[in-house]
Image (cartoon, rainbow, N blue to C red):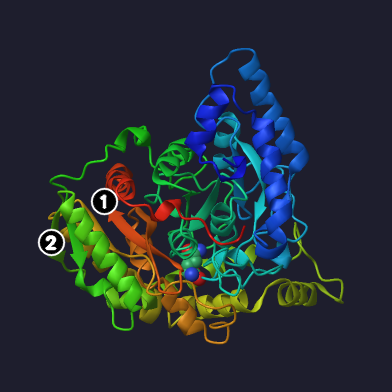
Amino acid sequence: MDLHSLTIHQLHDLLVRKEVTSREATEALYRRIGEVDGKIKAYLMLTEVEAIRQADEVDRKLIRGEEIGDLAGIPIGLKDILCTKGILTTCGSKILGNYVPFYDGTVIRRLKEREAVFIGKLNMDEFAMGSSTENSGFQTTRNPWDLQRIPGGSSGGSAAAVAADECIAALGTDTGGSIRQPASCCGVVGLKPTYGRVSRYGLVAFASSLDQIGPITKDVEDCAILLSGISGYDPCDSTSVNIEVPDFKRCLVRDVKGVRIGIPDEYFIEGMDPDVERSAKEAIDLLKKLGAEVKAISLPHTPYAVAIYYIICTAEASSNLARYDGVKYGFRSNRYEDLMEMYGRTRAEGFGKEVKRRIILGTYVLSAGYYDAYYRKASQVRTLMRNDFEAAFEKVEVIVAPTAPTPAFRIGEKVEDPLQMYLSDILTIPVNLAGIPAISLPCGFSREGLPIGLQIMGKHFDEGMLLRVAYAFEQNTDFHLKKPPIA
Ligand code: GLN
């Protein structure tokens, strides 16, 4: 077997049996990147020298006969929104094109403590605003299943890199679907944790009441391992919750007997791709066969989700992005005569079109006189949506639906029509508004051979149940074993 195509748990077993070294695996990944990334364009930057150093350290431990953890020596890719000490962190934006953080984000620190190997920084939509990675200030990542199609977004670089075996696993972030939708488009597993489960310290902020960091992996077991590695309370993030982190691997029990699964009518929307609908329904039938109890439920405020999200996320973004003014760090225009002109030109030249659109929208919905009509109203409806989920979770343990209404669309297809682009996240946004966790895993292929994702949503802090249901499904199917045609 090629080393680059291994999962975390497979590589870990080979490392402890001393059949492979971390250095060999790391070098195999750089070779793979050399072969395919010219086409995929998942990476913005590679950190080879440091990666080899990290790998050698783990190998030395193994030679000394020391025990190593699940993530030690495992090559991982990082979405370029995560602050890495001494390593460029652009957030997909020209305005941060020269930004080198002087500290590590908490997830980076945790993974370093667990001796993971960082391969490089992965492409994304600028400031995580987008569903296709076409909004990157640097390059458009391509879907390994069809190079003419988008990999999803905003964590498109992470999902494409995992799918194309350019890293063993990756981290992404999800504000309205940015882990799950690209995972679905690229045929890999992605999990958005409960809001507060994973520290956001050192995550460049987009919409602070929605953002979460999570794993993108080749299978459900890896997802459990990586989630355990990054979760936990952090005093540096005031929204992180001090609650016990289970060993998520122990949740993988391969059994769903008696688990109550809710199917929301509102998620099988008009205009949904027929292949997506068919695959999701077949997946639900399989879960039923495996012993789950399937019930119809209702989440009646779902139709408002996209509208609410685009008020709340733009409002928060307009505030968070006010800091990019060319004064303390990041890009500064060199064409100005006074301070005001410097601010204006820096932002005009540094931000891309979608980011500007959101700053303008967000500033508008927060402005005096409109605040009550838009922002306050949106926050109230957000509470109703959260209540919908709470009522549903009195009857069921998890809710199952497709992740995205269509498989990956063509590059360029939606760039001129932001509303169409926003609708790609219609099935993932409610989860962020409610703060609950959800996973996407492969559940089929379209007639054109494109991957389709199944979404499983759970109660606050019940990622264990998501992983259990996902694992049972995965172990009874082989969608996750198929590799994209890029050879
Ligand atoms: N596509 C959505 C947006 O553009 C979600 C992005 C995300 O989750 N970061 O805002």
Q: Is residue 44 visible?
A: no
Q: Is residue 428 visible?
A: yes
Quarter occupied by residue 84: top right
Report how far apart the C-alphas of labels 1 and 2 lie in the structure.
16 Å
Identify residue for label 2.
295
Q: Position of residue 211 (x, y in %)?
A: 47, 57
Q: Position of residue 409 (x, y in %)?
A: 50, 76
Q: Residue at x 56, y 36 (%)?
A: 111
Instruction: Using the image, determine if residue 350 lies above or below residue 183.
Output: below
Instruction: Using the image, determine if residue 141 lies above or below residue 398.
Output: below
Instruction: State the quadrant of the C terminus.
Output: bottom right
Which residue occupies the foreground of this view, 32 or 434? 32
Callout 2: few (<14), some (14-19), or many (20+) C-alpha neighbours within 10 Å?
Answer: few
Instruction: Using the image, determine if residue 160 lies above or below residue 303.
Output: above
Which residue occupies the foreground of this view, 165 or 373? 165
Identify residue for label 1.
459
